[in-house]
Image (spheres, coloured by chain):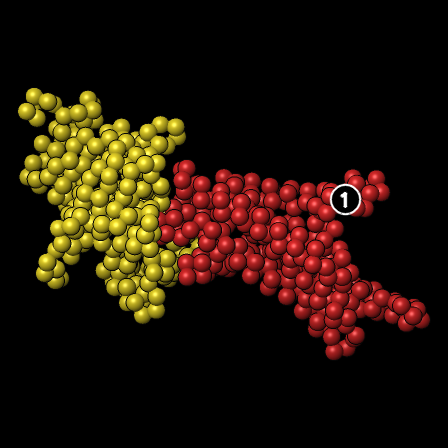
Chain colours: A red, B yellow
């Protein structure tokens, strides 16, 4: 039950802070603008595409690229959203209140993570509502869209876990945000050098987030990719819980 | 107010050889004491004497390096659920979530301490009325004055009717009227059988409400004895002897 209380508490804090609303408003406005551009491009190219037998459809030209833009924004949005989940509590001096209420570190971390994840999934759903609004007027490739949505959801969940972990380790929210951004970018592009050298397999490519997101955006669901994201989430949250538990012992 | 018909004399709190290091030095060393229901213990000491560390350990926010804490005879760390229900804690400078209203704070604290549904609603209404928080109930904690924050912190600590109330410098930022109200509240809690530990710098606070005083110096207990409200001078002498010399005058003690 304390898990639910922590989640509710963090959710309330997210809703009251202007940052979450400003981020939602700005990013959704940006995505809506891009949606109209993508839609305009799709409509303009419809006659040309109709003549080709395997021409890309609405999902390929509008739905998935829109989700790709959301993925790019997530690198900035998620660290800003997660930076103060634990570091902010530490600054407020409210962390000991949670310890004193007997809430285990793992539940504090998980409760806060779930609140942030809830916000991010809502953000994803609102973005998804744009292409879905035209489902009645065009042909949607539901399978491809579902795979891309799953990929995005996993990516957001992984970035949120990284952000929460950084917030647990950092003394100041700004440091947590910077660390989460750097880690996420590093994880995304860890294989850039290998790819430039023409190496497409190997451990370094397996480590990169892009290797596991891109197949999902193309509609290919592989259990390896899902396991990669789940492993990252579990590892980040376990490290965060361990750090928080040690803080109770140490400070 | 109704007094309990039979107040148990079994200690509600027992510290045994409690020790804790902080920032590489011993903050509390081999601290042992017991507190009975209804007893009000004043915890005195100069800055850095180990008062806040001791209270944080009792409240469960900090783990001791060694020693044990027993609540109503049960080990604190083996039964964290018990500690959650039995202890109310007001840390120094009442930490609050600035994004939450006064009412939401009470809900969050109640839920964290195991209160639900009607029990939580009743407890919240009662404490809001008792501490006169009605005008502030919908106000965000971030805009409260220091005195109002302290009152809210106190309300959160008392919400679940704890058996042990741990107050760290509760009179900070309170005006004289609020200090008098705080004293009344502490006496009320004591009369209903709640044990109270009150850490303070103010000797007058101890003589006004405490029936026992413990003086810490460099993390160790140097004095533990009764307080007589009419003998403020004796307490002052004892405190300053310990603060200056680390011990009471042996000749006078003899």
Q: Specify the farthest residue to the right.
A: A51
Give the residue furthest to the bottom. A136
The x and y percentages for residue B82 are 30, 54
Estimate the x, y position of residue B126 in percent, counting from the top left.
25, 64
Front residue of A225/B110: it is A225
Most foreground residue, A213 or B109: A213
Taking the spot 47% from the left edge, 51% from the top edge, the residue there is A106
Q: Considering only vertical position in the picture, is B80 above or below A146?
A: above
Give the image location of residue A6, x and y in percent.
44, 57
Secondary structure of the residue carrying tag 1 is loop
- In the image: residue B179, left or right of residue A4: left
Left/right of residue A223 with respect to residue B17 in the rendered view? right
Residue found at x 49% / y 39%: A171
Q: Position of residue B168 (x, y in %)?
A: 27, 43
**Residue that mark 1 sits on:** A202
Q: How many marks?
A: 1
Left or right, B55 with reference to B35: right
Quarter of the image with the C terminus of chain B is top left
Residue B146 visible: no
Tell me which residue sits at (21%, 26%) in the image.
Answer: B243
Q: Residues within 10 Å of mark 1 (few under 14, many from 20)?
A: few
In the rendered image, the quadrant that contains the N terminus of chain B is bottom left
Confirm whether residue B18 shows in the render. yes
Front position in the image: A128 or B37: B37
Q: Mark 1, chain letter?
A: A
Q: Is B207 rendered above or below residue B240? A: below
Q: Residue at x 19, y 33 (%)?
A: B215
């Amino acid at each position: 039950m304390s898990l639910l209380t922590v989640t509710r508490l963090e959710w309330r804090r997210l809703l009251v802070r202007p940052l979450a609303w400003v981020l939602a408003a700005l990013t959704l406005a940006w995505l809506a603008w891009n949606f109209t551009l993508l839609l305009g491009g799709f409509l303009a190219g419809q006659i040309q595409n109709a003549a080709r037998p395997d021409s890309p459809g609405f999902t390929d030209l509008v739905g998935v690229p829109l989700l790709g833009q959301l993925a790019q924004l997530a690198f900035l949005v998620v660290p800003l959203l997660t930076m103060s989940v634990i570091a902010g509590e530490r600054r407020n001096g409210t962390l000991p209140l949670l310890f004193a209420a007997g809430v285990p570190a793992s539940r504090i971390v998980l409760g806060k993570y779930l609140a942030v994840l809830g916000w991010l999934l809502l953000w994803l759903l609102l973005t998804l509502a744009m292409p879905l609004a035209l489902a009645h007027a065009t042909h949607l490739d539901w399978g491809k869209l579902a795979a891309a949505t799953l990929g995005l959801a996993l990516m957001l969940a992984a970035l949120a876990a990284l952000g929460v972990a950084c917030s647990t380790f950092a003394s100041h929210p700004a440091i947590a945000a910077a660390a989460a951004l750097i880690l996420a970018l590093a994880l995304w592009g860890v294989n850039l050098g290998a790819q430039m050298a023409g190496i497409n397999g190997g451990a370094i490519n397996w480590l990169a987030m892009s290797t596991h997101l891109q197949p999902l955006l193309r509609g290919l669901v592989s259990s390896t990719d899902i396991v990669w994201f789940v492993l990252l989430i579990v590892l980040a949250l376990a490290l965060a819980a361990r750090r928080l538990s040690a803080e109770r012992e140490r400070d | 107010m109704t007094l309990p018909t039979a107040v148990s004399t079994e200690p509600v709190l027992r510290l045994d050889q409690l020790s804790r290091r902080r920032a590489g030095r011993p903050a509390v060393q081999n601290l042992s004491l017991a507190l009975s229901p209804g007893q009000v213990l004043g915890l005195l000491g100069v800055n850095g004497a180990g008062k806040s560390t001791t209270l944080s350990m009792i409240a469960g926010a900090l783990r001791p390096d060694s020693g044990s804490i027993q609540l109503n005879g049960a080990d604190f760390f083996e039964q964290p659920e018990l500690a959650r229900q039995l202890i109310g804690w007001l840390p120094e400078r009442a930490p609050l979530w600035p994004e939450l209203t006064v009412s939401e704070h009470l809900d969050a604290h109640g839920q964290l301490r195991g209160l639900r549904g009607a029990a939580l609603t009743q407890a919240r209404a009662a404490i809001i009325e008792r501490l006169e928080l009605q005008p502030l109930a919908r106000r965000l904690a971030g805009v409260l004055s220091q005195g109002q924050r302290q009152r809210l912190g106190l309300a959160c600590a008392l919400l679940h009717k704890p058996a042990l109330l741990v107050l760290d410098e509760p009179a900070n930022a309170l005006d004289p009227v609020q200090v008098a109200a705080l004293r009344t509240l502490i006496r009320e809690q004591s009369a209903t059988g709640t044990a109270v530990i009150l850490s303070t710098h103010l000797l007058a606070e101890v003589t006004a409400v405490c029936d026992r005083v413990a003086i810490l110096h460099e993390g160790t207990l140097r004095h533990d004895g009764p307080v007589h409200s009419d003998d403020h001078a004796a307490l002052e002498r004892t405190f300053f002897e310990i603060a200056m010399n680390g011990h009471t005058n042996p000749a006078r003690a003899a």
